[in-house]
Amino acid sequence: MNDKELLELAAKAAGIVGIDGVYPIARDSSGECYFWNPLSDDGDALRLAVKLGIEITLADTDYVGANDQFEYCKNEDHYAAIRRAIVRAAAEIGRNYE
């Protein structure tokens, strides 16, 4: 699954009305547009995790996880790894809405 598909499913789980184009522009229920990318923004990722009740886990120094979605992050950006794990967990929740 590519990043756009992950973001679309995560948005669905979070109740975000729509994601448009390559750049994740979200639209809320009132039609207001805003930039939303929990893959690159710590705040967006944390708000997504809180809204969906996603449990964040630091398994050890090599893995981080959100619900049952773990990301290998040895010698990498741990923040990016946990954001991706959160989005993957949210996407799984969104997939169940289909």
Image (spheres, rainbow, N blue to C red):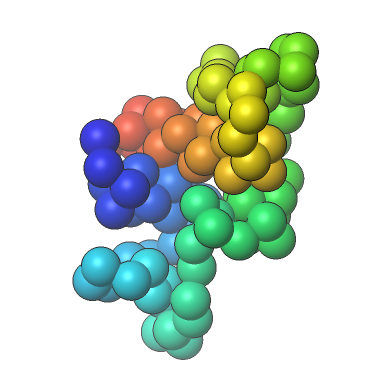
Tell me residue 61's x, y (percent): 75, 18
> Which residue is located at x 33 percent, y 33 percent?
95
Q: Is residue 2 left or right of residue 97?
A: left
Which image quadrant is residue 22 in? bottom left
Q: How many marks?
A: 0
> Which residue is located at x 38 percent, y 51 percent?
7
> Which residue is located at x 50 percent, y 52 percent?
39
Tell me residue 84's x, y (percent): 52, 39
Res. 83 visible in picture: no
Vertical side of 19 occupied by 56: above or below = above
Q: Quadrant of the C terminus?
A: top left
Res. 77 visible in picture: yes
Tell me residue 25's x, y (percent): 38, 75
Vertical side of 88 occupied by 59: above or below = above
Vertical side of 18 occupied by 33: above or below = below
Q: Quadrant of the N terminus?
A: top left
Q: Is residue 86 left or right of residue 13?
A: right
Tell me residue 38's x, y (percent): 54, 55
**12 and 29: which is toward the camera:** 12
